Amino acid sequence: MRQLSLGVMLFAFWLILSGHYTPMLVGIGLAATVLCVFVTYRMNSVDEETHPNHLFLSTFTYYPWLIWEITKSAWAVSKVIVNPKLPISPTMTVVGASQSTPNGIATYANSITLTPGTITVGVRGNELTVHALVSEGADDLEEGVMDARVSRFERGV
Amino acid sequence: MMPLLIDIVSWALIAAGSAFVVIGAVGVVRMPDVYTRMHAASVSETLGAGLLVAGFILQAGFTLVTLKLLFILGLFFFTAPVVTHALAQAALHEDIEPVLSDDRRNDRATDTVAGQPEKTNARPSS
């Protein structure tokens, strides 16, 4: 099942990047897809960590939420940048990650970094070290709204 | 009428995206140290790039180019945090101390060294 979805995605990738739909090129793409799926199957490297297809549906609700968060904080950071006084209050803090899988923690850490104004600078177990441009950014993360949202995403809802 | 409207929206998006890229660049110059500069750069690579690509998509219409543009955006959104994280880690490993107005690391970490990077793996022990 996981192999099948990997194959579909690889073939779609080929079709999008190729743009030439002659029988020979599509055939080569199909062959390359089958070869890749076969090799990864032999290597036993396709599992729920490397190809988390069970999270596919929940991305449709998580990504829009994340994009809106990014937009809000990008706007806030832009206002700080153009402010003549440059009102920054750099803060280092440690936030807990309540996710149970490595993928969940990576998603949380990357979401923090992707949001302007906060960067994950270190991960140890379930604790993320975060650098925030303004102290409010650190406060928001310590509140744990994003943490709870990523945990929900990780459970597939 | 419709093509004109699409052009107007598309150009508005491209102009706004360019504005955010410039704001990010100004921020990189104005910020005091490497960590705060990364925050400024992430404005360019998220909102700036996102609005630019949205404008390009409206110009391209329902074509293969649109799918490719979405791919580029997806690539940005998956690689940018990895690169930013690697850069911040490298700076910490090099003992570049961030300019901080508030350091809550030791109050909040349950493990006393959680806030510090692992020095043992940072450099080859030559």
Image (cartoon, helix red, strand yellow):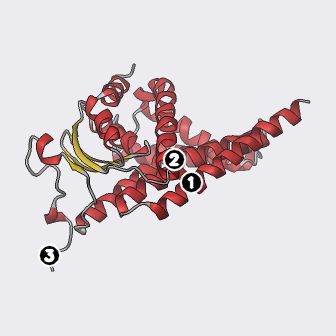
**Residue at (51, 31) in percent of width and height:** A68
Which subunit holds the residue at mark 3?
A: B
In the displayed structure, A60 sits above or below A10; it is: above
Marks 1 and 3 belong to one chain: yes
Q: Which residue is mark 3?
A: B125
Sooner in the amino-acid sequence: mark 1 or mark 3: 1
B93 in relation to B75, above or below: below
Say what amino acid the circle numbered 3 marks: Ser
CA–CA distance between discs 1 and 2?
6 Å
Tell me: B41 left or right of B111: right
Q: Which residue is mark 1?
A: B23
Contact between marks 1 and 2 (CB within 8 A): the answer is yes
Q: Secondary structure at mark 3?
A: loop
Q: Secondary structure at mark 1?
A: helix
Instruction: Tell which subunit mark 2 falls on.
Output: A
Q: Which residue is mark 2?
A: A78
